[in-house]
Image (cartoon, helix red, strand yellow):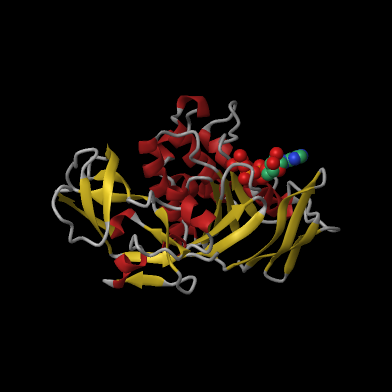
């Protein structure tokens, strides 16, 4: 196993740079998510890694081994990578055990080893009791676990997963996320996981590559992505939050404490910096709008959504800036609340 390196990798389709000079150094054993909206080039990047797609520019390496350049291309079967697709891609006429053993058919493996590898792989994904069933007699989650097991039998250096949970319902997705985590821990393989679902990426990956229109816009841990987004686009794409204009401060700073409210004071005419304010950093308190106000910041409740564990409150400040807060109880629509902002992140222009 070794570091996976993408060096200025591009793919041009009909003169469009659908992947545009992506560079990433992916340490061995990482769990990486390629995250971005539909059409941003995630699947194309994955297909170039797998060897199903040629590169227009750049280079792919696994340690010292060159996988592909614009001129050379190692065939998929020589890359020691496994791939898991959204559609599972299982053979309907083969049993679960035969499907899992299929990638071993072309490797001259003694029959005893062959059976043991299938058994180990099926046990890893807890599917041994289903070894003699056919794929059509399994649920979606079970089929995806068989696809994972089929990946595992070849001891791949890298496992590529293309939206593997897209066809599953919400409950099953959560339990499959657990299966992926366990699979990763047990195999130590590098995992590259394509998704447009930021919650899924955040919960699984230890590094996330955010892509927008073929470009890499941020490469960081889930925590850094959430708390320190590099651009306003990333801030809006990841998690819930509001973009507020406030007093000019240096870019890319976390501001905390009492001074945060003053940044957004309504008399502050020269508002020039954009800030990301997460809803958990907005405290609200109902006030009587007809009485003299002592609160520096106020807002009107425009709507709210009940989310079980809390209410999501939508607010508008007197200068028409909109923001969101979390609150433990419902508040009347149209009510005036005082605001206390406890944290803000100043965005790059
Ligand atoms: N073979 C092809 N020929 C021409 N254009 C293509 C081809 N494959 C992909 N594209 C285009 O490249 C762009 C990126 O596609 P890609 O499938 O990589 O995006 P994605 O981020 O994975 O999107 P999704 O989440 O919808 O699958 C899209 O505009 C797509 O239409």
Q: Which residue corresponds to the image point at 41% horizontal and 47% vertical from the top-left?
A: 177
Residue name at image x 56 percent, y 62 percent: 218
Quarter in which the C terminus is drawn: bottom right
**x 82%, y 43%: residue:** 14
Judging depth in this view, the residue of 223 and 121 nearest the camera is 223
Direction bottom: furthest residue = 250
Q: Looking at the picture, how far across and down is residue 186, in whole percent?
A: 44, 58
Tell me: residue 274, above or below residue 289.
below
Kindly identify the residue that appears in the image at 49 percent across and 33 percent down: 167
Residue 62 visible (yes or no): yes
From the viewer's perspective, tell me whether residue 116 is left or right of residue 177. Answer: right
Lateral position of residue 28 relative to residue 326, left or right: right
Occupied quadrant, residue 335: top left
- How many numbered circles does the render carry? 0
- Would you place residue 157 above or below residue 177 in this image? below
Is residue 260 found left or right of 113 in the rendered image? left
- Give the image location of residue 246, x and y in percent: 41, 63
Q: Position of residue 165 (x, y in %)?
A: 48, 40
The answer, for residue 257, to whether it is visible in the render is no
Q: Position of residue 220 (x, y in %)?
A: 51, 65
**Rendered-image quarter of ligand 1:** top right
Q: Quadrant of the N terminus?
A: bottom right
């Amino acid at each position: 196993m070794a570091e996976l390196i993408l060096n200025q990798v591009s793919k041009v389709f009909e003169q469009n740079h659908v992947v545009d000079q992506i560079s990433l150094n992916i340490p061995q054993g990482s769990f990486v998510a390629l995250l971005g909206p539909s059409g941003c080039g995630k699947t194309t990047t994955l297909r170039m890694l797998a060897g199903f797609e040629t590169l227009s520019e750049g280079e792919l390496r696994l340690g010292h081994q060159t996988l592909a350049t614009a001129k050379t291309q190692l065939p998929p079967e020589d890359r020691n990578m496994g791939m898991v697709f959204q559609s599972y891609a299982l053979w309907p006429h083969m049993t679960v055990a035969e499907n899992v053993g299929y990638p071993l058919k072309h490797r001259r493996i003694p029959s005893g080893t062959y059976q043991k590898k299938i058994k180990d792989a099926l046990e890893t994904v807890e599917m041994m009791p289903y070894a003699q069933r056919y794929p059509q007699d399994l649920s979606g989650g079970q089929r995806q676990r068989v696809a994972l097991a089929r990946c595992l039998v070849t001891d791949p250096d890298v496992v590529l997963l293309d939206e593997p949970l897209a066809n599953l319902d919400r409950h099953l997705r959560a339990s499959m996320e657990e299966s992926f985590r366990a699979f990763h821990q047990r195999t130590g393989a590098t995992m590259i996981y394509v998704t447009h679902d930021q919650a899924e990426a955040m919960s699984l990956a230890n590094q996330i590559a955010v892509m927008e229109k073929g470009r890499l816009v941020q490469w960081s841990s889930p925590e850094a992505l959430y708390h320190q987004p590099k651009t306003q686009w990333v801030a809006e794409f990841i998690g819930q939050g509001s973009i507020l204009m406030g007093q000019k401060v240096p870019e890319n700073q976390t501001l905390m404490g009492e001074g945060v409210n003053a940044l957004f004071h309504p008399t502050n005419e020269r508002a020039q910096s954009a800030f990301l304010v997460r809803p958990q950093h907005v405290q609200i308190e109902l006030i009587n709008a007809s009485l003299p106000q002592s609160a520096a910041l106020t807002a009107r409740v425009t709507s709210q959504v009940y989310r079980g564990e809390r209410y999501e409150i939508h607010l508008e400040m007197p200068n028409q800036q909109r923001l969101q807060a979390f609150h433990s109880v419902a508040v009347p629509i149209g009510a005036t609340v005082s605001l206390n902002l406890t944290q803000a992140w100043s965005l790059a222009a």
